[in-house]
Amino acid sequence: MKIGIIYAMQKEIQTYYDFNKFQKIKYDIYGIDIYISHSKKIILIKSGIGKVSSSIACTILITLYKVDIVINIGSGGSLKPYINIHDIILIKKTSYHDVNLTNFHYSIGQIPNFPQTFQTNNLLRKKFKNILYENKIKFWEGQVVSGDIFIQTKKDVEIILKNFPNAISVDMESASISQVCFQYNKPVIIIKIISDYITKNTTTIFQKNIKKIFYKSSHIIKKYIQTIMM
């Protein structure tokens, strides 16, 4: 089994893996970094931020490296007052919050000829939940919405929750990765760690927490990856 792991920024993955145990692959696409484990069974790819960059990275994993499973690990912003920084979010479904073709009778967030929401893989989520339960780690499970906007005002949140009242987190990559996996019929699991919540200091909070939030969850995610490779 081959596993492809997508992360937007180096800070989101460096606590999980010793890069000395991976070979860096030269790839002639701006902003894309690829690392392959010595066993050739784990491929790490730094996509860069945003929907297009993450879509390119996911397509590379599936078409060039023929991965069996796609994992997205990254940070997300909290949309609910009870979800705090450092909390683990296990994504059940994804949608775009910055897509609106309702004039053409599509649902808000829906790309023509695609579903409004994209589901992650039930079996992969179940295995991760079992590990979290075994280690008595609190987590949340629900919907994330994605867009090419860094959400930083209460008005932004109000608009998102008006359209997606059940959304619990927001990011810039999950929905696009899910769409690519949907199109290629590849199982995907998305794990987010909350890095910020919406205040007037959202950017500062994000920059302060982006590196350290992953230390808390690193051993659990490494254990999970080992489990699904068995």
Image (cartoon, helix red, strand yellow):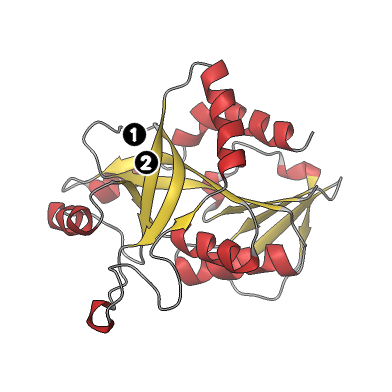
Residue 137 screen position, x and y as percent: 47, 21
Q: Which residue is drawn at 59% across and 36% down?
A: 15
Observer-nearest of 227 and 156: 227
Q: Residue at x 73, y 33 (%)?
A: 226
Residue 171 screen position, x and y as percent: 38, 54
Q: Which of marks 2 and 1 is nearer the N terminus?
A: 1
Observer-nearest of 216 and 172: 172
Q: Which residue is drawn at 38% across and 60% down?
A: 95
Q: Can residue 63 be seen in this view?
A: yes
Are the two marked residues, 2 and 1, in contact with CB atoms closer than 8 angstroms? yes
Identify residue type, mark 2. Ser
Identify residue type, mark 1. Ile
Q: Would you place residue 102 above or below residue 196 in this image?
A: below
| Residue that label 1 marks | 85
In this rendering, position of residue 70 left or right of residue 35: left
Label 2 secondary element: strand
Number of numbered markers: 2
